[in-house]
Image (cartoon, rainbow, N blue to C red):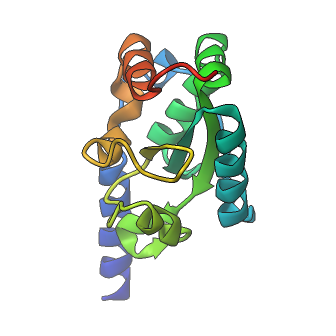
Amino acid sequence: MIRRVWAAGLALALAACATTPDAAAHPEARPYAAEADAARNVDAALARAATSGKRVLLVLGANWCHDSRALAGWLETPRFAALAAQSYEVVFVDVGTPQTGEGRNLDIAHRFGLAEITGTPALLVLTAEGKAVNLDTAATWRNAASRSEAAIHAELAALAGPPAP
């Protein structure tokens, strides 16, 4: 019985993190640190955003998830790094496996109005005041590995808001 429950939970977790036929089509990175003080990192990013006029790009994911690794990989490329440098304070938050009840740092998502994380990654864009500007699309990023570079860049550029001073 326990094996069946464990297997069903693992299958659910893997299904929530969509698969892609060609994992080499996107870069990957593993920036989600379970031991990081996520709340402190978010608060520091909000403080920097208040000074810089940028928004906060809060990436809620996990290293076990290829969609999370893919999004993080794109964010490390020169094209995305330039967009982030101009418009965002980026914070990666490890959320574990919330799909199976083994989530962590979920209070951070709740703090900004994201009631539930049903797949990873989720992506919140926050104003310097901590107001989420994309609650309607925050949970749609769990297919990040199958999105094109151009589509990801266009969405992040649109969410960046007005240029930082």
**Quadrant housing residue 84:** top right
User: Is any part of residue 34 visible from this angle?
Assistant: no
Residue at position x 51%, y 32% in the image: 71
From the image, which quarter does the C terminus lie in? top right
> Outermost residue toward the left?
136
Taking the image as shown, residue 154 lies to the left or right of residue 42, namely left
> Outermost residue toward the bottom?
1
Residue at position x 49%, y 47% in the image: 65
Q: Position of residue 110 (x, y in %)?
A: 42, 68
**Quadrant housing residue 98:** bottom left
**Quadrant housing residue 77:** top right
**Does 22 sit above or below residue 105?**
above
Q: Position of residue 121 (x, y in %)?
A: 44, 46
Taking the image as shown, residue 26 lies to the left or right of residue 76, namely left
Q: Position of residue 162 (x, y in %)?
A: 47, 22
Residue at position x 41%, y 22% in the image: 152
**Does 120 sit above or below residue 37?**
above
Residue at position x 46%, y 67% in the image: 111
User: Is any part of residue 111 visible from this angle?
Assistant: yes
Taking the image as shown, residue 5 lies to the left or right of residue 131, namely left
Front-lying residue, 128 or 10: 128
